[in-house]
Image (spheres, rainbow, N blue to C red):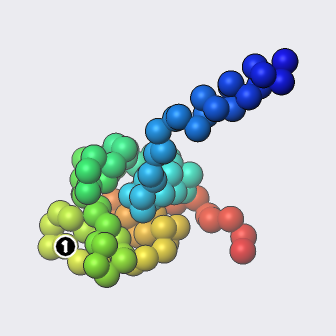
Amino acid sequence: MTELMGELMGAFDELPRVRRGPLHSLYAALRRRAPQVSATRPDGDVLRVAYRGREAQVAWDDELQVFAWASGDGGQIGPDVEKAAEVVASALDAPVSPGAPG
C-alpha cells in the first residue's frame, strides 16, 4: 500500500506547473464581483470583457505593475485586482457585487 502511495505522489511531481498571472486573477475577480460581465479567459496578454453591447480589453502592464485598458484611449486602471474588477464593470455599466468585508 505504501509503495502505491509513493507512486501516486511521484506522479504529481510530473504534472506541469500552471502559472496564473494577474489577468487570470482579474478574470476570477470579475466572475465573483460582476458575474453578468462576459469575460473570456485571458488570451495571451489581453482579457476581453463585454456587457450589453459594450466591449473592452484589459492588459497587465509588466513594467508599471498595473492593469491598463488595451482598447480605446488606453490608460491605467490600477494594481489592485478587486478594485480593477470594479472599475472594469463600472466602465461597462455592469452591476458590481460588494467585495468581502476587510
Residue marked by disc 1 = 74
Residue 57 image point, x, y percent = 25, 58
For the point 29% across and 72% down, the residue is 61
Residue at 36% from the left image edge and 77% from the top image edge: 65
Residue 41's place in the image compared with 69, above or below, is above
Tell me: 11 left or right of 80.
Answer: right
Whether residue 82 is visible here, answered yes or no, is: yes
Residue found at the far bottom of this picture: 64
Q: Quadrant location of residue 66?
A: bottom left
Q: Is residue 15 left or right of residue 94?
A: right
Is residue 60 or residue 4 the one in the foreground? 4
**Residue at the (43%, 76%) spot, across then down:** 79
Mark 1: secondary structure: loop
Task: Name the residue nearer the viewer: 9 or 38.
Answer: 9
In percent of width and height, residue 59 lies at 28, 63
The answer to whether any part of residue 50 appears in the image is no
Residue sitting farthest toward the left: 73
Q: Relative to 46, is 73 on the left or the right?
A: left
In terms of depth relative to the viewer, which is nearer, 9 or 23?
Answer: 9
* Quarter of the figure that contains the N terminus: top right
Where is residue 21? Give x, y as percent: 42, 58
Q: Position of residue 72 (x, y in %)?
A: 15, 67
Q: Residue at x 26, y 55 (%)?
A: 46
